[in-house]
């Protein structure tokens, strides 16, 4: 066979200069199914990513720029997922007590904290909110409460409570030592002893837990509280000292 016979003709298709088609030309040559396939392959993911980004930015701007009610009291309840009815009653009582204007103010009662099962998210949330001053009242079982008192996260009640309230609650007070350094454990604390909490097992909100409560709840005030006066007013009310 002659070598020349194996070569493609100079006019063969592969030697022809290919003209780059515009998107409009490509689409005009496709039927509906082909257009949809082309769109999915080249544009759908980009479109979805753009929509998600727009949604995220819009939500962020709305969350940051929209006016928010002022939080006049924030309560963190650890390991006590109150029944909805009990929680609603608690909120209503506090709204009335603190004369909350629902259009500009709010009370937050968060019962989602769960430290029984070593929930890292709950522990992290407590830490962040405590440091940033977003919490006022702290309610937890004694075994958990002591850890936060020990770490100097709670206000000494000798400083926070009025004399009459402190005296009236003298038989309910919780005290412990605080740590001097990060190496200590609560059972080995060498810091000064102080009063940081009030036993709360007799409060109405814990009625459902009576009979099998082995670790009594204790209530205290977060050291970084921005609403310590409202926290004290709430304590006075919970223990019937405002009558």
Image: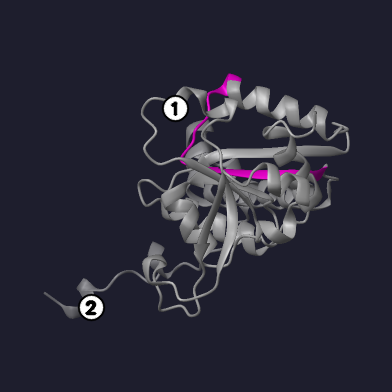
Would you say residue 108 is visible in this rendering?
A: yes
Q: Specify which label sits upstream in the sequence, 1 or 2.
A: 2
Mark 2, Cα crowd under 10 Å, few <14 / some 14-19 / many 20+, is few
Q: Position of residue 136 (x, y in %)?
A: 69, 51
Image quadrant containing the C terminus: top right
Q: Position of residue 71 (x, y in %)?
A: 78, 45
Q: Position of residue 152 (x, y in %)?
A: 57, 67
Residue at 38%, 25% in the rendered image: 211
Left or right? Give the position of 56 relative to 217: right
Q: In this rendering, is residue 240 above or below 40?
A: above
Q: Position of residue 75 (x, y in %)?
A: 65, 43
Residue 196 drawn in magenta: no
> Which stretch did the figure color magenta?
70-85
Circles 1 and 2 in contact, beta carbons < 8 Å = no
Residue at 49%, 73% in the rendered image: 179
Residue at 52%, 69% in the rendered image: 178
Mark 1, Cα crowd under 10 Å, few <14 / some 14-19 / many 20+, is some
Would you say residue 20 is visible in this rendering?
A: no
Q: Nearer the viewer, mark 1 or mark 2?
A: 1
Hey, which quadrant is residue 6 in on the image?
A: bottom left
| Residue beneath disc 1 | 209
Say which element carries label 2.
helix
Residue 77 drawn in magenta: yes
Q: In this rendering, is residue 12 above or below 42?
A: below
Q: Residue furthest top?
A: 85
Q: Nearer the viewer, residue 175 or 82?
A: 175
| Image mark for residue 4 | 2
Q: Residue furthest left?
A: 1
Q: In this rendering, is residue 203 above or below 127?
A: above
Residue at 51%, 75% in the rendered image: 191
Q: Nearer the viewer, residue 178 or 67?
A: 178
């Amino acid at each position: 066979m002659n070598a020349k016979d194996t070569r493609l003709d100079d006019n063969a298709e592969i030697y022809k200069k290919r003209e780059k088609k515009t998107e409009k030309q490509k689409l005009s040559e496709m039927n509906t199914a082909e257009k949809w396939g082309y769109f999915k392959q080249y544009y759908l993911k980009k479109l979805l990513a753009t929509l998600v980004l727009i949604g995220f930015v819009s939500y962020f701007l709305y969350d940051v720029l929209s006016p928010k009610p002022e939080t006049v009291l924030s309560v963190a309840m650890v390991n006590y997922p109150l029944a909805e009815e009990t929680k609603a009653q608690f909120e209503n009582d506090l709204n009335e007590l603190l004369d909350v204007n629902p259009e500009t103010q709010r009370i937050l009662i968060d019962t989602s904290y769960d430290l029984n099962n070593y929930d890292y998210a709950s522990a992290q949330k407590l830490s962040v909110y405590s440091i940033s001053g977003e919490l006022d009242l702290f309610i937890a079982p004694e075994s958990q409460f002591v850890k936060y008192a020990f770490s100097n996260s709670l206000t000494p009640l000798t400083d926070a409570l009025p004399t009459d309230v402190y005296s009236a609650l003298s038989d309910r007070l919780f005290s412990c030592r605080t740590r001097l350094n990060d190496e200590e454990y609560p059972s080995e604390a060498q810091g000064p002893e102080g009063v940081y909490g009030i036993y709360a097992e007799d409060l109405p909100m814990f009625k459902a837990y009576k009979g099998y409560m082995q670790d009594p709840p204790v209530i205290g005030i977060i050291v970084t509280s921005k609403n310590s006066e409202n926290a004290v007013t709430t304590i006075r009310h919970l223990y019937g000292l405002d009558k």
